[in-house]
Image: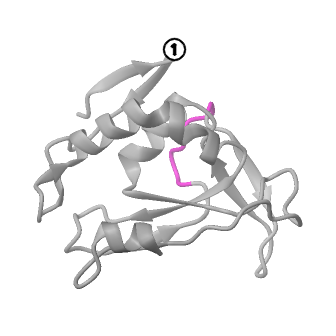
Amino acid sequence: MAPITEVEGRRVALSNLDKVLYPETGLTKGELLHYYATTAGVLLPHLRDRPVSFLRYPDGPDGQVFFSKNVPPGTPDWVTTAEVPRSEGPARMVLVQDLASLMWAANLVTEFHTHQWTAADPDEADRLVFDLDPGPPATVVHCCEV
């Protein structure tokens, strides 16, 4: 059974905390959850009110990788969701609004992908994101220069 913790008065199940997510560094799921929890004050304003897709790999980075765009089965009723227009028809997506929903979502996923608009105003993008991933031969310093 997954350990249960309380976050802002919400019960959140955390699972597989020793699972290694990044073999190159040995970073575990528990360490990633800790990182999200300690950076939530900076992270949450960038997630709040924005529909979120999740990059998931439940069997680790060498297993199946998939995007989850719709609200996952078993989502607690206290997690905020919104109907979002999409080319193939509307979808119900998660909004990560607070620390409890961040910890719940981070337990499921490795990456959050937010829309460039808020759920309340899907016709008006209000930001631009550059996804710069360091890797040979580019370093994080090269990405900063770009």
Q: Does the magenta stretch include residue 73?
A: yes
Q: Which element carries disc 1, helix, strand or loop?
A: loop
Q: In this view, does 91 lie above or below 138?
A: above
Percent of width and height locating residue 130: 56, 72
In this orientation, which residue lies closer to the viewer: 84 or 50? Answer: 50
Q: Is the magenta stretch mostly helix, strand or loop?
A: loop
Q: In which quarter of the image is residue 48?
A: top right
Q: Is residue 29 magenta?
A: no
* Residue at 50% from the left image edge and 45% from the top image edge: 74
Q: Quadrant of the N terminus?
A: top left
Percent of width and height locating residue 140: 32, 67
* Label 1: few (<14), some (14–19) or many (≥20) C-alpha neighbours in 10 Å: few
In this orientation, which residue lies closer to the viewer: 19 or 27? Answer: 27
Percent of width and height locating residue 63: 23, 73
Q: In this view, does 41 lie above or below 125?
A: above
* Residue at 61% from the left image edge and 37% from the top image edge: 79
Circle 1 residue: 9
Percent of width and height locating residue 29: 24, 47
- Position of residue 93 in the picture relative to residue 67 (left or right): right
In this orientation, which residue lies closer to the viewer: 71 or 37? Answer: 37
Q: How many labels does the image show?
A: 1
Q: Quadrant of residue 129?
A: bottom right
Report the span colored magenta. 72-78
- Tag 1: amino acid: Gly
Of all residues, the one furthest to the top in this rendering is 9
* Residue at 32% from the left image edge and 73% from the top image edge: 134
Of all residues, the one furthest to the bottom in this rendering is 137
- Position of residue 142 in the picture relative to residue 75 (left or right): left
* Residue at 39% from the left image edge and 32% from the top image edge: 37
